[in-house]
Image (cartoon, grey):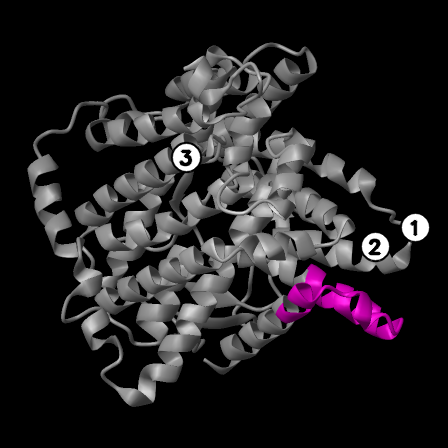
Amino acid sequence: MEGFFKLKENGTNVSTEIMAGFTTFFTMSYIIFVNPAILSATGMPSQAVFLATIIAAAIGTLVMGLFANVPYAQAPGMGLNAFFTYTVVFALGFSWEQALALVFICGMINIFITVTKIRKSIIKAIPESLQNAISGGIGIFIAYIGIKGANIIEFLSDNTNIVSINNQPFAADGTYSNIFSIVTNGGIVPAVVDFTNPATQLSIIGLVILVILIVLKVKGAILLSIILTTLIGIPYGIVDLSNVSINTAGLSSAFADLGITFGAAFGPKGIQSLFNDPSRIPLVLITIFAFSLSDTFDTIGTFIGTGRRSGIFSEEDIKALETSTGFKSKMDKALFADAIATSIGAVFGTSNTTTYIESAAGIGVGGRTGLTSLVVAILFLACILLAPVAGIVPAAATSPVLIIVGVMMMASFIKIDWEDIEEAIPAFFASVFMGFGYSISYGIAGGFIFYCLVKVCKKELNQVHPILLVSTILFILNFVVLALI
């Protein structure tokens, strides 16, 4: 194990890696339950999506750990699954089989741009100030995820600010049932809750426990806080142990349902029908482009934001990324592992599989090698039988972890010259858009756009790397397309 994962070389050991694996898994295990709930709204069998989610996460994470030897976990991405259901299927009228075909094609495109070095060329083209902004922005983003998950904030929107319900224009005098989505405009007002919710109270307790353990430098503080908060949640009524059991009764029916989604992307209702209507081909291409752009930059942002600061991608590895051919650097291998995961997930029946920002929680514990990913993959596979066990860890126990990890990652802001307005403006928009736009790729888009705007104003556009300029144009085009559809 030492020889394969090079633990000493990476400044870690088996116990730290295992602890990191458990931490990462518990902070992202919610996807096992959330993804089926979102995708099944399209008509996909929920049990099949449950298994597809686990299988895609396990395979993608295994490839990341065993091939790239980095501590990142993969699973169907939040945001991308919502785009799959509410935009691609409901708004644009694709069948879920066609949507899976679109995801598969997106994965193949990502494999192509990884093999041809386009992805790593994008990374090399990003200025150092923006890379630090992305890292700090991910800190804001992941802390915001934690604050939301802890139910510390709530949002108020009166009926004058509601734009649509169930993807249909809102009517104040209408009657709605089976509501699955509500869109409001900028009039929405965030506020701190009144703390009467037991789940919120438990989150605050968990946050206090974690802060105390972190400040006192207790070994395994993050995982220990998750365990302690979960135990406290039992008398609170947040953690229900009555449903903890090994589920074998429904396993055979779940695998039978998996037969419905497995390979559906290639069937007569999938890719075989995708290009039948010439009038819809532009829409097909636009949708593939939107999938690929978000998937690509979500991953790049995660690697830049967490890999360099933690030392996972060392200076030597970054140099190898710039000069080597093939898959000689960790970053090369990690990008390839991420690229193939999306296509694998589509084959089994789930939306885009991507590298999870929650991996930062395991990295914060000290995870530095693929052994962390191996542990995460094993835990995902165990959930085929033991899903209720993963489900007993409440969001109130994992959300404080994301908040504190976000705090740690914001240290990258210190490397930005905030007194230089030309550097500060792109850095600000990169970091703030990432958190408030709830998207790594949107944050990168904001940073790119304002970086180019600053250079245009200073008549220094020739200093912008061509790849960054093209990426900026693609982002603007993507926003235009989203406005049109």
Indicate whether residue 224 is drawn in magenta: no
Left of 276 or right of it: where is 222?
right
Q: Position of residue 75 (x, y in %)?
A: 38, 43
Residue at the image position 64 percent from the left and 63 percent from the top: 445
**Magenta stretch: dominant SS?**
helix
Q: Residue 217 versus residue 388: which sits nearer the camera?
A: 217
Residue at the image position 59 percent from the left and 49 percent from the top: 301
Q: What residue type is labelled 1?
A: Glu
Left of 347 or right of it: where is 71?
right
Left of 444 or right of it: where is 66?
left
Q: Which region of the structure is painted magenta?
A: 447-470
Left of 120 or right of it: where is 254?
left
Marks 1 and 3, how far apart at CA? 42 Å
| Foreground: disc 3 or disc 2 | 3
Q: Quick check: marks 3 and 2 in contact, CB under 8 Å?
A: no
Q: State the residue position of label 1.
A: 419
Marks 3 and 2, how far apart at CA? 38 Å
Is disc 1 surrounded by few (<14), some (14 to 19) or many (20+) residues within 10 Å? few
Marks 2 and 1, how far apart at CA? 7 Å
Q: Residue 51 versus residue 239: which sits nearer the camera?
A: 51
